[in-house]
Image (spheres, rainbow, N blue to C red):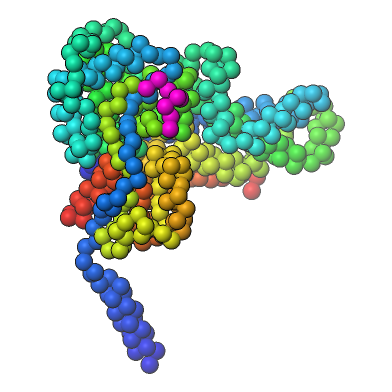
Amino acid sequence: MTFSTMLSTMAAGMLRTCGIFFLTLLGSLPLGMVVCLLRKSKHALVRTIVKIYISIMRGTPLMLQLLVWYFGPYYLFRLPIGGWRFPAIIFGFVVNYAAYFAEIYRSGIDSMPVGQYEAAEVLGYTKGRTFFRIILPQVVKRILPAVTNEVITLVKDTSLAFTLAYSEVFSLAKQISASQTSFVPFVIAGVFYYIANYAVAFAMERIEKALNYYR
Amino acid sequence: MKKIVCIALAALLLLALCACGKDKGPVTYGFLDETLGVESYAIGFRKGDDALMQTVSGAVKALVKDGTYAAIGEKYPDIKDYLCLKAEDISDADLPAKGSGDPSYTFIHGFDLDYPPYSYLQDDGSVGGFDVELCQAVCDYLGWKYQPLPFNWDAKDAELNAGSCDCIWSGFTKEGREDDYCWGITYSNNTQGILVASNSGIKTLADLKGKTVGVQTATSAMDMLEGDRKDLADTFKELKVYETYTIAFADLKAGAIDAIAIDMTAGSFLIANEAAAASK
């Protein structure tokens, strides 16, 4: 295999990796907020259920979760699972990452001083307005570094999609390595991951700077 | 004075490096004459899929008869000697007719793309290998559509049972799994052997006493060393289990392990690749 074939094969795999990456972020960033708000719900039952959900999502390997989401419908309910492969992968990643993002959001929200809520109440803000106009904009700024961490982890976690036969860049690296008896594909995969993560870190830094309008 | 010391030390370092790099003659790799045992590669179908198994096995026989099987074997020199089906042994009686399959049917071939030379990525980046080509030929013969599913080997049973693929066909060993699948035709025999470096001094299985031996996880070589040949594995200093043979082979080249337990076809593939790289 020539170096350029290797590169183009793996670049195609990287595109598939990016597919999971963007769809997961698209789903899990908003879902994480919903989970976080439910986690802070006044109802003990809702709170407990969400706590159990977060605990399972964080406490079990993502690889196992992907297997359960994809094969579960067949093994539990004998449903045909043709065509469910890609949705199952995205679903598995989204619900897993939403749990992590929810906890990051919660840390941000809980870090806001009570005084701000009290001041907002005095000024006649409703609860919703207080949250969206006063609390959330500050929370977003505070949690950005933690979110960046998680997003970078996501880039690397996409390699778990091969559990469900999704040929992303790392599984291709393994397969090319087996057929060529060479470690070069792993180095190429490393470079691809690094470029992707550099782009993520760069973009997040720009966002951090843009939001830093009071300093 | 400092400069002189520096230069002297640098020269010493250089000399030391030169000594390290001194050519000890090319190291080659080969198999011990003694082997661990023979196993058969067959096509695994879901239990109860007897009709599908009969059709595919029949089509394989027909391809043996018309020479396609041997022709594909010619493309894979590491496998050629291990193909066990002979045209003269096949009777014409129960072969399916060419094009007798349902043309709207898609046959999904489940395999591991990590398993040269049976199924692996080709030099042009396409999916190939002996098993892939034979399965494609079976589909062409019957008139079916062919669809490859390069799955994760760890999830093969889940994929097969859930109906995501119609068969497991990827250098798949029958021994030890006789009751777990509906087995199709055995199309290749393979021998499990021990791969060593020419300068290792290991000549027989007995020489492996106290040595470190590497093996790839979830392979027949590993099953063998943990089952029938556990007596032999017990004499090793350690049986190291690797995720892939590529990494095990790199460890062998680096001298971190003394031998690799591997089937002859996959091992010959590694040796051939290594020789090709060395001659470049």
Span highlighted in magenta in the image: B176-183
| Numbered label tally | 0
Q: Position of residue B173 (x, y in %)?
A: 37, 32
* Residue B106 in sight: no
- Nearer to the camera, A199 or B75: B75
Q: What type of secondary structure mainly makes up the magenta span?
A: loop
| Residue drawn 52% across the image and 42% down it | A152
Q: Is residue A184 above or below residue B141?
A: below
- Nearer to the camera, B5 or B153: B153
Q: Quadrant of residue A57?
A: top right
Q: Position of residue B240 (x, y in %)?
A: 45, 52
| Residue drawn 45% across the image and 56% down it | B235
Find out whether residue B182 is within the magenta segment: yes
* Residue B230 in sight: yes
Q: Which quadrant of the figure contains the N terminus of chain A?
A: top left
Q: Position of residue B262 (x, y in %)?
A: 34, 45
Q: Position of residue A193 (x, y in %)?
A: 43, 44
Q: Is residue B134 above or below residue A97?
A: above
Find out whether residue B232 is within the magenta segment: no
| Residue drawn 48% across the image and 19% down it | B162
- Nearer to the camera, A129 or A54: A54
Q: Quadrant of residue B12?
A: bottom left
B123 left or right, relative to A172? left
- Nearer to the camera, A190 or B71: B71
| Residue drawn 17% across the image and 55% down it | B279
